[in-house]
């Protein structure tokens, strides 16, 4: 067992947050090492090539608002990127309507559109609105019964894999657009002339989101140590224990999923371990599908709330960029509502039937191949134990020189730009901690 010299900062994980932290530590002149358990960097932001088709880990799109992060991201990608105006739709009641559903009921069957509009107006003018106790109450209060019944509740049940009654209302202020009354009225008669929501415009590397991660990895001040994850972490001695090496550190930046990190902490207090075990997330199965022909609709992604379809969202990689598929062909990602491992031979005919109904393919014969994929950590579940559990775990880690960051390290719901920002903030915290430690030395 080798005992290495102490490193000022150790980083666990070379996804976007971990690499961003490394980059900004380098800018600050802070020596560090970065470890990644997988054989390649990028985390979920990677692109796989299969028979000339390029597949991301479902839809990964850059919504860049921060000027500094935008400049960095585009510099890492290089010149080969496009900026795209979102084309997303909802498929329900046998028709497409614009996103978001709550402000675009035009085109639905008249009785459904009326139910949605009537319910929204009643909710809008209802003065008795106590603080919602869960996400279902949030929907009913803000959108009314019709919109909640036809989209918000069924879609989010399929997305999160749990009832909206199990989810707090606190997570959704940014990611669930709250339209104004005039938007809903205009959307009911087809007069909306603007896109709503945080993701109306996005940047996309022409050869897939993996180009961002590849560009970042090439510009880091430290070599990424691939295929390496500590078997245990001595948080009191501040040491990472690998099979072949002990790495002392002053500050640890972890982007590993929070419950996984706590499980690695040797001798962590019982209340911290129990709180971390209460943190919940859902995994996700999805299909990457290659088509022998173009996608039938020029859409980027489609939300599917109805239970009769085995998927809740479909996206088209080759509509993000035509370089994602061979000329004249297309490829899709299909996110499955069922969290059990799919049996592809029995599932694919149902998926093909749904895609044909949606006019995304002409017939099942257009499917060249389909691959089953799994994401172990897909969505953090903001259940009623969420905040209470974090209030136990995070202060303990902070007291022991551990900075947790990222979508899973921070246990949150966030975008790729957020991941870059989290890395920048984690680097600043680490540098500050190093400065405080130096100031305490005699």
Image (cartoon, helix red, strand yellow):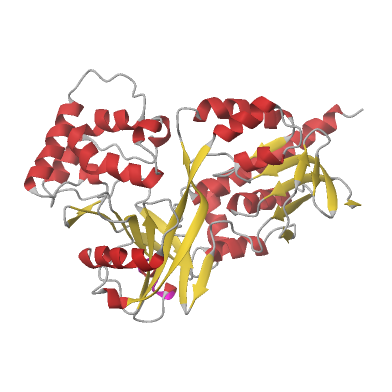
Residue displayed at 59% across by 53% down: 16
Coordinates of residue 420 in the picture (x, y in percent) = 57, 49
* Viewer-proximal residue among 211 and 229: 229
Q: Is residue 395 visible?
A: no
Coordinates of residue 197 in the picture (x, y in percent) = 33, 45
Coordinates of residue 21 in the picture (x, y in percent) = 66, 48
Coordinates of residue 57 in the picture (x, y in percent) = 48, 60
In this picture, residue 14 sits left or right of residue 238: left
- In which quarter of the view is residue 286 placed? bottom left
In this picture, residue 381 sits left or right of residue 353: right
Q: Which residues are magenta?
A: 319-323
Residue displayed at 33% across by 61% down: 300
Q: How would you classify the magenta stretch by its main secondary structure?
A: helix
Residue displayed at 37% across by 46% down: 159
Residue displayed at 69% across by 31% down: 398
Relative to 78, say whether 15 is above or below: above
* Viewer-proximal residue among 185 and 158: 158
In this picture, residue 85 sits left or right of residue 422: left
* Viewer-proximal residue among 262 and 394: 262
Outermost residue, left side: 110
Q: Is residue 34 visible?
A: yes
């Amino acid at each position: 067992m080798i005992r290495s010299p102490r490193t000022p900062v150790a980083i666990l994980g070379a996804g976007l947050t971990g690499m961003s932290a490394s980059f900004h530590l380098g800018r600050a002149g802070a020596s560090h090492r970065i470890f990644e358990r997988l054989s390649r960097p990028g985390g979920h932001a990677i692109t796989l090539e299969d028979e000339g088709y390029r597949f991301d880990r479902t839809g990964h799109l850059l919504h860049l608002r921060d000027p500094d992060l935008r400049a960095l991201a585009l510099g890492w990608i290089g010149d080969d990127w496009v900026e795209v105006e979102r084309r997303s739709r909802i498929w329900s009641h046998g028709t497409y309507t614009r996103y978001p559903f709550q402000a675009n009921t035009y085109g639905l069957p008249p009785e459904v559109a009326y139910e949605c509009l009537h319910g929204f107006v009643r909710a809008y003018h209802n003065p008795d609105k106590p603080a919602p106790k869960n996400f279902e109450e949030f929907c009913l209060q803000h959108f009314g019964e019709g919109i909640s019944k036809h989209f918000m509740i069924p879609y989010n049940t399929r997305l999160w894999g749990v009832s909206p009654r199990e989810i707090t209302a606190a997570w959704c202020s940014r990611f669930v657009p709250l339209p104004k009354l005039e938007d809903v009225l205009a959307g009911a008669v087809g007069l909306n002339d603007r896109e709503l929501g945080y993701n109306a415009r996005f940047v996309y590397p022409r050869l897939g989101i993996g180009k961002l991660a590849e560009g970042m990895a090439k510009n880091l001040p430290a070599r990424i140590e691939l295929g390496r994850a500590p078997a245990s972490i001595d948080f009191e001695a501040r040491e990472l224990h690998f099979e072949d090496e002990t790495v002392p550190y002053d500050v640890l930046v972890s982007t590993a999923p929070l419950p996984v990190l706590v499980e690695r902490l040797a001798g962590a207090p019982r209340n911290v371990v129990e709180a971390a075990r209460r943190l919940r997330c859902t995994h996700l199965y999805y299909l990457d599908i290659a088509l022998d022909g173009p996608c039938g609709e020029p859409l980027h992604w489609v939300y599917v709330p109805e239970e009769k379809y085995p998927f809740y969202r479909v996206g088209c990689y080759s509509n993000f960029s035509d370089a994602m598929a061979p000329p004249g062909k297309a490829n899709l990602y299909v996110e499955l509502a069922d969290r059990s491992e799919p049996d592809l031979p029995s599932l694919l005919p149902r998926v093909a039937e749904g895609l044909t109904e949606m006019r995304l393919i002409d017939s099942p014969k257009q499917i060249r191949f389909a691959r089953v994929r799994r994401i172990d950590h897909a969505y953090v579940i903001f259940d009623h134990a969420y905040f209470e559990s974090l209030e136990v775990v995070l202060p303990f880690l902070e007291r022991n020189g551990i900075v947790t960051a990222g979508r899973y390290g921070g246990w949150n719901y966030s975008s790729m730009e957020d991941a870059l920002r989290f890395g920048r903030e984690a680097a600043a915290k680490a540098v500050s901690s190093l400065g405080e430690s130096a100031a305490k030395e005699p």
